[in-house]
Image (tube, rainbow, N blue to C red):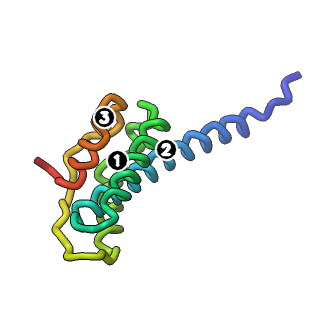
Amino acid sequence: MNDLDWEHVIEEIEDSGNSEIAAVRSYLIQAMIHALKIARWPGSTAVNHWTGEAVNFLQQAQDRYRRGMARDVSVEACFAKARRTVLATPGDGPDQPIPGRTDLSLDALMDEAADLRALIDAIGRGPA
């Protein structure tokens, strides 16, 4: 007598996984937005705040990330969304150019042993 609705259980597990993937993407985009704001307006009084936010969001992404998510999290797509957001945001100083892409890999961004500040700086610098 197995009254368990397996289809519903599977759907709930998939929804939970999709929610976690969306959270990782969102945190990664937010980290990139703040890193790009630092690059766009390096003289802003908000740089220290943006740095703290970028580090926090990247840490949150790392905390939720699981290797099985790799095929569903595109660094390039996250960067493009972050860049588009920053370009549409008015700044409080002269606009500096920001990179059109990043060459950071998902593995590098999700490496919990990496220097978070160095990753934030690398996002704002763009490809080497």
Q: Residue at x 28, y 43 (%)?
A: 117
Q: Within 10 Å of the Cα at label 1, are there few (<14), some (14-19), or many (20+) other Cα atoms?
A: some
Q: Amino acid at mark 1?
A: Ser
Q: Residue at x 50, y 49 (%)?
A: 22
- Nearest to the observer: residue 53 or residue 25: 53
Left of 111 or right of it: where is 39?
left
Q: Residue at x 66, y 41 (%)?
A: 11
- Nearest to the observer: residue 103 or residue 4: 103
Q: Residue at x 38, y 39 (%)?
A: 71
Asked if one can make out residue 37 in the rendered structure from this viewpoint, the answer is: yes
Q: Of label 1 and label 3, which has the lower sequence position? A: 1
Q: Amino acid at mark 3?
A: Asp
Asked if one can make out residue 40 in the rendered structure from this viewpoint, the answer is: no
> Which element type, helix, strand or loop, lies under badge 1?
loop
Which image quadrant for residue 116? Answer: top left
- Nearest to the observer: residue 43 or residue 102: 43
- In this picture, is 54 found above or below 118? below
- In this picture, is 34 found above or below 55? below
According to the picture, the residue beneath numbered tag 3 turns out to be 107
Q: Which residue lies most toward the right here? A: 1
Q: Amino acid at mark 2?
A: Ile
Q: Within 10 Å of the Cα at label 2, are there few (<14), some (14-19), or many (20+) other Cα atoms?
A: many
Cβ atoms under marks 2 and 1 closer than 8 Å: no
- Residue 83 coordinates in the image, percent (x, y): 29, 63
- Residue 57 coordinates in the image, percent (x, y): 43, 48
> Which element type, helix, strand or loop, lies under badge 2?
helix
- Residue 16 coordinates in the image, percent (x, y): 61, 41
According to the picture, the residue beneath numbered tag 2 turns out to be 21
According to the picture, the residue beneath numbered tag 1 turns out to be 74
> Which element type, helix, strand or loop, lies under badge 3?
helix
Q: CA distance from mark 2 to mark 3?
A: 15 Å
